[in-house]
Image (cartoon, rainbow, N blue to C red):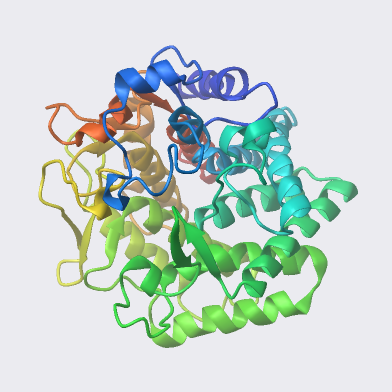
């Protein structure tokens, strides 16, 4: 497979299929057609309520949000941010200014989301359900934010500013990131996720602090990186002080290293590695801890989860004794922790693509001589026939309400694959 041509096909899919008529990048489309989801599609492919663990109190009729709108925009901001990062890495690898076309599309999407937040509640970066227009406007329909709505859009607009931005764009991004940072601080990092009170920092939000002592956690980095970027673009030292305080707490408590029973999610481990590299290269905290050692730990743990066919499952538990991911017991689960099918050994193409990006970091810093080869095998295995969210070969690994994920075009997978490919070009795995 010609990987460059595949990257162009994927970019075309994002720009000409995934974008809605207003320029927002939808996270899910029909498979294999790549068309927008409809109520009819949902009635044919979605059985039961994905959030049945919450007794139907989250989405659906309760909040006036149809399922097809939820699915198409749930991870749309992630896709826009990862698209920008992929094209910024493309530009660094090739100096080809045409990379800006894709980056502009992602920035147009995220600018819309930030501007709607600035009008409603400054700094609130919400998931753009229904495109945030008409009956789905931010003040008329259910919307939510999350920690992933901080790190991925934040990294995206940051990379747009430093790789493509003119003076006006840099000023705009600084304003966006500062507003979001102030929103978190003003709300003491509290927010509502899927109708449930949660916290943007701390171990309790991730099931790692049952006594709710306020202990820090590695995922705190996902909020602190965009906040540090806000400092870099605006010069506002209150953001730097907050980052130094929160990351300092993580370092002091030794929670950036993987610990026994940490939830083992390849997505998280890659994001932790990506944010660790940011602090190593871009921040005043470069000498405060062994960031490369952390990246190495995330890499070594993730590598243990690889399947013989170079795919990955979503999640398990980390075993500190063996430094490996222990898989959950196979089989469809109905408990609340299985919202994404995580309690199964179902294969996940998005997670597989993210592992390829993690492999580029291991290669770049010479952490594993096999990293480059693994990256290439994964990239070569994933074409337009391997972009559904989940692969359930036996048909019994996804519970009924999640079976649609085996029949859906996942733009998270596509944008993550593109990012891995251009990272591979940038670090020299590929010429």
Indicate the quadrant where residue 171 lies. Answer: bottom right
Looking at the image, is 238 positioned above or below residue 23? below
26 and 316: which is toward the camera: 26
232 and 19: which is toward the camera: 19
Indicate the quadrant where residue 326 lies. Answer: bottom left
360 and 318: which is toward the camera: 318
Which residue is found at the position 15% from the left and 72% from the top?
Answer: 321
Looking at the image, is 300 positioned above or below residue 403? below
Answer with left or right where residue 61 lies relative to residue 315.
Answer: right
Answer with left or right where residue 379 lies relative to residue 173.
Answer: left
Residue 206's spot in the image, x, y percent?
A: 36, 66
Which residue is found at the position 69% from the left and 77% from the top?
Answer: 240
Q: Give the farthest residue toward the right.
A: 167
Q: Give the farthest residue toward the top.
A: 33
Which residue is found at the position 56% from the left and 42% from the top?
Answer: 82
Residue 45's spot in the image, x, y percent?
A: 31, 22
Answer with left or right where residue 49 lies relative to residue 281.
Answer: left
Residue 63's spot in the image, x, y percent?
A: 50, 43
Answer with left or right where residue 38 lies relative to residue 153.
Answer: left
Looking at the image, is 421 positioned above or below residue 334? above
Residue 30's spot in the image, x, y percent?
A: 42, 19
């Amino acid at each position: 497979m010609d990987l460059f041509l595949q990257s162009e096909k994927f970019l075309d899919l994002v720009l000409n299929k995934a974008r809605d008529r207003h320029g927002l990048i939808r996270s899910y489309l029909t498979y294999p057609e790549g068309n927008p989801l409809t109520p009819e599609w949902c009635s044919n492919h979605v059985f039961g309520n994905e959030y049945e663990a919450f007794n139907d109190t989250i989405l659906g009729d309760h909040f006036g949000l149809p399922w097809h709108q939820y699915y198409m925009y749930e991870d749309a901001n992630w896709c826009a941010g990862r698209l920008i990062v992929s094209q910024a890495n493309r530009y660094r690898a090739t100096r080809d200014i045409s990379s800006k076309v894709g980056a502009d599309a992602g920035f147009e999407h995220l600018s819309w989301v930030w501007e709607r937040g600035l009008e409603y509640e400054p700094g609130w970066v919400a998931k753009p359900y229904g495109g945030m227009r008409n009956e789905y406007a931010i003040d008329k329909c259910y919307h939510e934010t999350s920690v992933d709505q901080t790190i991925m859009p934040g990294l995206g607009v940051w990379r747009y500013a430093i790789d493509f931005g003119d003076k006006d764009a840099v000023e705009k991004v600084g304003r966006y990131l500062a507003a979001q940072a102030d929103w978190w601080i003003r709300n003491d990092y509290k927010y509502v996720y899927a109708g449930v009170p949660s916290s943007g920092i701390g171990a309790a939000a991730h099931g790692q602090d049952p006594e709710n002592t306020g202990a820090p956690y590695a995922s705190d980095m996902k909020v602190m990186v965009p906040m540090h970027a806000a400092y870099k673009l605006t010069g506002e030292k209150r953001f730097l002080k907050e980052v130094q305080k929160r990351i300092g707490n993580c370092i002091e408590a030794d929670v950036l290293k993987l610990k026994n029973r940490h939830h083992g999610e390849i997505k998280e481990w890659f994001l932790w590695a990506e944010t660790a590299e940011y602090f190593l290269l871009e921040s005043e905290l470069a000498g405060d801890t062994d960031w490369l050692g952390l990246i190495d730990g995330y890499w070594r743990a993730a590598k243990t989860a690889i399947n013989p066919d170079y795919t990955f499952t979503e999640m398990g538990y980390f075993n500190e004794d063996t430094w490996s991911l222990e898989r959950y017991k196979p089989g469809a689960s109905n408990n609340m922790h299985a919202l994404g099918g995580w309690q199964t050994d179902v294969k996940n193409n998005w997670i597989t693509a993210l592992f390829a990006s993690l492999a580029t970091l291991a290669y770049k810093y010479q952490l594993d001589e096999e990293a480059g080869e693994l990256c290439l095998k994964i990239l070569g295995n994933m074409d337009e026939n391997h972009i559904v969210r989940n692969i359930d070969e036996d048909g019994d690994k996804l519970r009924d309400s999640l079976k649609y994920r085996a029949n859906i075009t996942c733009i998270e997978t596509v944008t993550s694959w593109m990012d891995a490919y251009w990272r591979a070009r940038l670090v020299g795995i590929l010429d």
